Structures are given as structure tokens and as C-alpha cells.
Image (spheres, helix red, strand yellow):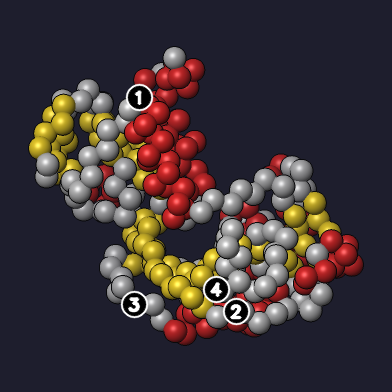
Amino acid sequence: MLARRPESRAVLEAFMKTEMAADCALYSQAEALRRWPEFAAAPLTGALWSPHEVRVESRSAIPRLAAWLAEALGVCFVRSAAVQDVSLPRIHTSRGVIVADTCVVCPGDDLTSLYPEAIAARNVTLCKLQMLRLASPERALPTVLMSDLGLVRYHGYADLPEAAALRTRLSAEQPSHLQNGIHLIVVQSADGSLVVGDSHHYGQTHEPFAEQSVEDLILDEFRAATGFDAPPVVERWTGVYASADQDMFREAPEPGVRLVMVTSGTGASTAFAIAEETMADLFGSARDVAA
């Protein structure tokens, strides 16, 4: 987490006093530049480093995970099918009926097909984001990168009292970035290219088009945080996910059924833990499920 304002460093100092900062390190400007000379041109006031981050390439990991589940554990995937109704023990799909004693409904960003009343009661809306893949910068980045804008977005930082002063300064200096929900995440893929994001826009419906002005804001923050120009954009895409005040929810709309939704941008990070908790909720403790 590269900090380039005194207010940003103050947030990081406050974060270091919380239990979330376990095993993290906060470096001064001089220490950060000695550790990461790649950012010598960046206007740093310090940097937070975490040893806990894991980089997963979803494009390849998800199909490989599905293949492993099918081959190693005998999981049956029914593809190109829509679930139309759940009335246990019968689950009606567009490809026939599935008989089951239990059912976990994970609708993703579909707010209307199954249990729409329960979803509406949670005030769930949709968040659209824009992301980019940049050509390799011909240098290896030492870690995943984030910047000042993330400190007023992620709750672990943004909920700290020290974040108020940073938000005030960012509102004056980067109002368009805040209005478009911009915060910087830069990760390097095995081929050297950079995945860079992202923006956040909220509403019940979204156009499928990416806006150049939003892309320019993301690349502007990339340059400001790293101190070097962004390589050429080689891919662009948009994503949509469910969003609400809470990060996720799980409820039982009827016996044997669990409705589970991640209503934030943390699904890839939290899915396995949520799955374990959901199985324990349905069948007993995690140990019982494993047995």
C-alpha cells in the first residue's frame, strides 16, 4: 500500500495498531525506497507491506478448480442450465428435475430469478466495475500494489477515525476519482502483463459499455502512485456484482435451503470460508462435514 500523502501515512499508522495488521510492516519513505527502488519517482510518505496476500489468476484457476472437483471428488456440473424453482426435494431446472435433500442457492448478480423478495429485503443493488490489462512494463513488480484511494474505500482503513482527514483532502484533490469509485489495484501476471483496476458504479441496471473517462482516471492514479507511465492497454472488461451495506448474507428461506450472496467485491477472497460455514450451518460443524 503506497502512501503519498501525510494523511495516508496517518491512516496506515492507525491501522498498524489494530489486530488486522498482524505480521504487516510499515516503512518510512526512505525504508520503502530502499526496499522497492522501482518506485523512486513516486512521491511516497511511506508504505504498508502485508505478507498475507495471494495472487490468483481467476481466468485459469476457476476452470482448473472445476475440473479437479469433477475428477477428484466426482462433483457433477450441470452446465447451460437455469434453476427455475426450488421445492425440495425437487429442484426444477431448464434441463430437467434434480432431486436433493438440501440446496444452496448462490445467485451471484441475479436479483430476480430465485427468492427475489428475500434479496429485495436486503436492499441489494448491482455494482459495475471497469478493469484493464496492460502490456508488460518490462520490469518485475515486487508485490501487489494499492494506493491512497484504497484507504478510504476498504473498511479496515476507511472506518478508522484518521481516514476522515484523508477523505477530505481526496475530495478536494481527486473528486472525480471518488465520484467514480476509483481505487488502484495492480497485480502482475506470469506473462508480465498487469491487471489494473478498478471503478465502481451502483444501480439496478447498467449499460455494458466501458467509459474512456473512467479508464483515464484509473490510469491517472496508476501514474501518480507508481511514478511511471502506464504501458499500453491490451484488454478491457467490465464486471457486475451484487452490492449491499453488508459484505455478505446467508439465510434459510425454507427448510433445507440456504440462500447465500456475497454483496461486495470480496467474493473470490472469501468464497471458500463462506462455503465451509454454509456447509456447517446445514450439516453441523466443519469437522462433521469433513467426516
- Foreground residue among 64 and 269: 64
Say which residue appears at 58% left-offset and 63% top-offset. 191
Query: How far apart, in angstroms, are the residues tagged by discs 2 and 4?
Result: 6 Å
Say which residue appears at 10% left-offset and 37% top-offset. 96
Query: How far apart, in angstroms, are the residues tagged by discs 1 and 3?
Result: 40 Å
Query: How far apart, in angstroms, are the residues tagged by discs 2 and 3?
Result: 22 Å
* Residue beneath disc 1: 282
Quarter occupied by residue 146? bottom right
For marks 4 and 1 on the same chain, the one whose residue lies earlier in the sequence: 4
Query: How far apart, in angstroms, are the residues tagged by discs 3 and 4?
Result: 19 Å
* Residue beneath disc 2: 231
At label 1, counting other C-alpha atoms closer than 10 Å, the crowd grade (few under 14, some 14-19, many 20 or more) is some
Q: Secondary structure at mark 4?
A: strand
Q: Amino acid at mark 1?
A: Leu
Q: Position of residue 282 (x, y in %)?
A: 35, 24
Disc 1 vs disc 3: which is toward the camera? Answer: 3
Disc 1 vs disc 2: which is toward the camera? Answer: 2
For marks 1 and 3 on the same chain, the one whose residue lies earlier in the sequence: 3
* Residue beneath disc 3: 209
Q: Secondary structure at mark 2?
A: loop
Q: Position of residue 149 (x, y in %)?
A: 62, 69
Q: Position of residue 128 (x, y in %)?
A: 39, 67
Say which residue appears at 81% left-offset and 56% top-offset. 26
For marks 2 and 4 on the same chain, the one whose residue lies earlier in the sequence: 4
Residue 88 visible: yes
At label 3, counting other C-alpha atoms closer than 10 Å, the crowd grade (few under 14, some 14-19, many 20 or more) is few
Is 150 situated above or below 73? Answer: below
* Residue beneath disc 4: 134
